Image (cartoon, grey):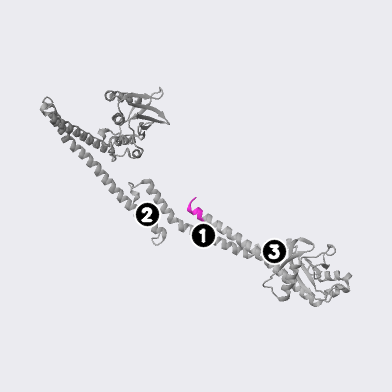
Amino acid sequence: MTVRLRLALTVFLTGLATALGVLVMVAIAFQRFERENTWQRGDAFLARVTMQHDLLERQQRQPEEFVAFLRSLLLFEPDSQLYLLDASGRVLASTGQARLPPGFAVALAPVQQAAAAAADGRRRQAAYVMGEDPERMEADTVVAARVLPHAAIAAAATEAGYVYLVSRNPRLQATRWALVASSLASPALGSVLVVIVLGTALAAWIIVAVTRPLRVLSDEVATAAREGFNAATVAPAAPSPSTHADDEFGRLRSGFHTLLARLRAQWDELRRLDHFRRESVSNLSHDLRSPLTATVACLETLERRWSSDPSRDEDRHIVAIALRNAANAAGMVRSLGDLALLDEPEFKLRPMRLELGEVLDDIALRFANRAAALGVALHFEQAGSEPLVIEVDVELFERAVANLLDNALKFTPSGGRVVISAAMAGGQVEVKVTDNGAGIPAHDLPRLFDRHYQRRDSVAPATSDDGKGLGLAIVKRIVELHQGSVSVASTQGLGTTVTIRLPAQRVAQA
């Protein structure tokens, strides 16, 4: 859901809740107004009646004609009923059609409350009083009451009574609906609609004005994320007329452009430094190969000259150490050059379609003599009888597997076992080199393929090129160029398994 839609939905729901709240408040206010008006009319009516007539005395003198008299008082109040009560709330006479049981009494508390409000003028505190309707006991209605002081209500009574007016809601529903319809059709409705339209238009304008610069900024962020730092469109665009530098969105957009420009400058600097590094490593490797090759040749010549002279045994031992170190240095320089070449953006694979089993079997045969000399059993296994056809750069792939085999043989003791296996798993070809050698500590596994990492103990991570920390880095880079992945699982004392996963389909050239 977009920001505009969320804002529009929020405005709509807020307006709807406000409209419903206003309707509820109007309904409550109208109901209160009706009740207050009803109570005031009823109280004024009782004030006139009690002022003009002594109801208790008349009821005692003419009990048969008293009900008719009460009904005559209500000719203009058809929705009201009048009751004469004694001091305990017992009904002495009523204008209702229903016959009340003898001794029927109404709740006295509302009667006394209404009478007290009428007596001391507390109309502000008691705007209206809700009481019982003797004929409809389940409903609360607006009631009014007045105290009727008299010497006696019955023969031996000396306490006061009450005149009790029940004002029922008028049953003029058709008239009310007609009144509502006429109100809706009045010009007031047009004014309300105009206000709603203007409010909606203003809200829409605010939403568009607020979200337009945010949308422009989000488009620029999406463009930068999609095209990266190499695209020309990454450069900050001209400020949009809808985005002002003095508001929050303008400052955010300006900050984004500043950050983007700084990131692009840093990216260019990193690219320059990376190119300088690769070029320096390549040049250094090229420049060191010739003197190292000459040094190795000179040391080999000295070793041959002194091989038949027993007096030169100590010198030959020193030459052997120097020759071994020179050869290691030459191998490391060669690996540095190869790794720098593989890191070049312009480097391209030369893929060939081949049967994987044959290639791995040839590599195993190549290392067979070395494995036999070390007392290690080396063999190749393939899951299933179906040929595994894959497309790889043969030279690079063989070097990656050879590096893994060299590592496995280096750290597998005599009597151990090294296995090369191949299988199809989940649409990928898996090549595993497994040994039961010393294994690798768990804390070293995450950094095993880091070209800058080299353990210093006797159980160093298995790397080729004389253990200088570049063999596995080269393996990882070769596998990445083939759009594959490499992982290692190892347990100290039990051995190590390195797994190369390559896609079974044709590898896209870089």
Marker disc for residue 472: none
Name the residue beneath numbered marker 3.
Answer: 179
Q: CA distance from mark 2 to mark 3?
A: 61 Å
Magenta residues, as a range?
A: 1-7
| SS for callout 3 | helix
Q: Position of residue 241 (x, y in %)?
A: 40, 58
Tell me the chief SS of the magenta region: helix
Badges 3 and 1: C-beta atoms under 8 Å apart?
no
Total marks in image? 3
- Amino acid type shown at disc 2: Phe
Looking at the image, which residue is at 84% across and 65% down?
A: 103
N-term mark: 2 or 3: 3
Seen from the viewer's position, the closer of residues 279 and 135 is 135
Q: Position of residue 257 (x, y in %)?
A: 35, 54
In three-dimensional space, the C-alpha distance between marks 2 and 1, rounded to whole angstroms, equals: 28 Å
First reached walking from the N terminus: tag 2 or tag 1: 1
Q: Residue at x 70, y 61 (%)?
A: 177
The residue at which mark 2 appears reads as: 256
* Direction from residue 217 to residue 153 in the image, left or right: right
Reply above or below: 385 against 26.
Answer: above
Tag 2: Cα neighbours inside 10 Å, few (<14), some, or many (≥20)?
some
Work out whether mark 3 precedes mark 1 in sequence or the reverse, and give the earlier one.
Answer: 3
From the viewer's perspective, tell me whether residue 380 is left or right of residue 337.
right
Q: Which residue is mark 1?
A: 203
Give the label, 2 or 3, closer to the camera: 2
